[in-house]
Amino acid sequence: MKESKDRIHNQRFSVAPMLDWTDRHCRYFYRLMSKQTLLYTEMITTGAILHGKGDYLLFNEEEMPVSLQLGGSDPIALAQCARLAQERGYSEVNLNVGCPSDRVQNGRFGACLMAEPELVADCVKAMRDACDIPVTVKTRIGIDDQDSYDFLTAFIDTVSNVGCDTFIVHARKAWLSGLSPKENREIPPLDYPRVYQLKQDYPHLTLAINGGIKTLAECEQHLAHLDGVMLGREVYSNPYLLAGVDQHLFGSNADIMTRAQVVEAMYPYIEKHLASGAKLSHVTRHMLGLFQGLPNGRAYRRHLSERAPKADATLDVVIAALKLVTEYRQPE
Ligand SMILES: Cc1cc2nc3c(=O)[nH]c(=O)nc-3n(C[C@H](O)[C@H](O)[C@H](O)COP(=O)(O)O)c2cc1C
């Protein structure tokens, strides 16, 4: 019982896995603003983890809790990766059954797996057998013309039968051909009531909703029906939204950092990153939206986006960008 309560607590608010966006630098930055949010890695394929040259599982301790999202459909490879995820210290491992890109379909994983619930169940079972951390699934409400509620429940039935008790549901279907991944995040209509219905019919499962959510007030509305909310693009473009999460959604009394404090708290991390010979913009590209909507927020953004990519850019670029907003005085 306690375990499932913890699980619900963990899933209550999360930042979506986003390829090329939610890398370890991004997650370090997000963690400064919210201690409770569950963070997801970008999708990492089993092939990259098991046969790639780099260390795709690298993260900073401070980011925890983090869920590793895997792309794949070979139960043996997924099991190996789930074991590695646990060994490396990830909090959860998640299977991607929602990404519609062609590249992903060629590898027979992502959203097209919704059509093969038995295979997904085999994958999830193999992953669960290989590790003790939670194994969760991120999915859509349907694919192509297979978009009935019965199709969705048949998928949930088959996958939950092997013990998966947590699903994050992007509340729109995916078209597997004809639409780009970006269009597939915008064109198929959102259907939140369908996800609410799932919770009615599967009260024992931990169910989180994803897609098009933009404010903490909207999160609260969804949380009246479901166990969790997952936000992607809105957090990326307006990351300071995270600063209110612990207080508003988790009842925390801890002080909320100001935006300037968040930037300053990044300095030691940035210095360490630069000392390793890496580029400033790898870190600062995730910080561009921090002052979104504030006076001179655009000047901050421009300063960082123009100067940080230069090979010799140092922390001074960030200090100067911050001054543009903190020392800005509205014209009388
Ligand atoms: C740039 C980008 C990359 C994404 N990469 C992934 C991914 O690696 N794995 C995944 O499951 N979803 C991925 N998504 C989808 C998001 O996780 C999320 O489901 C989608 O953006 C809808 O949520 P939102 O409206 O809150 O952004 C990506 C979305 C974006 C914008």
Image (tube, helix red, strand yellow):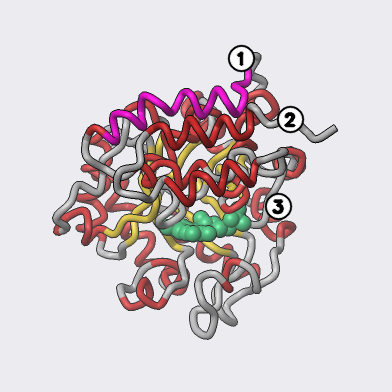
- CA gap, disc 1 to disc 3? 31 Å
Q: Which residue is the site of mark 3?
A: 196
Give the x, y percent position of residue 60: 32, 32
- Residue at (32%, 58%) from the top-left corner? 123
Question: In the displayed structure, would residue 243 be above or below residue 137?
Answer: above
State left or right for residue 277 relative to residue 250.
Answer: left
Q: Which residue is the site of mark 1?
A: 254
Three-letter residue code for mark 1: Ala
State left or right for residue 43 relative to residue 225.
Answer: left
Q: Which residue is the site of mark 2?
A: 329
Give the x, y percent position of residue 304: 49, 44
Three-letter residue code for mark 2: Arg
Task: State the extent of the magenta-drawn residues as a range.
Answer: 255-274
Q: Do the residues under discs 2 and 1 have CB atoms within 8 angstroms?
A: no
> Farthest bottom residue?
178
Let me know if residue 301 is in the magenta part: no
Is tag 1's residue or tag 3's residue first in the polypeptide sequence? Answer: 3
> Farthest front residue?
332
Residue 157 appears anywhere in the view: no
- Residue at (43%, 38%) from the top-left corner? 27
Is tag 3's residue or tag 2's residue first in the polypeptide sequence? Answer: 3
Nearer the camera: disc 1 or disc 3: 1
Let me know if residue 263 is in the magenta part: yes
- CA gap, disc 3 to disc 2? 47 Å
Q: Nearer the viewer, residue 110 or 29?
A: 29
Three-letter residue code for mark 3: Tyr
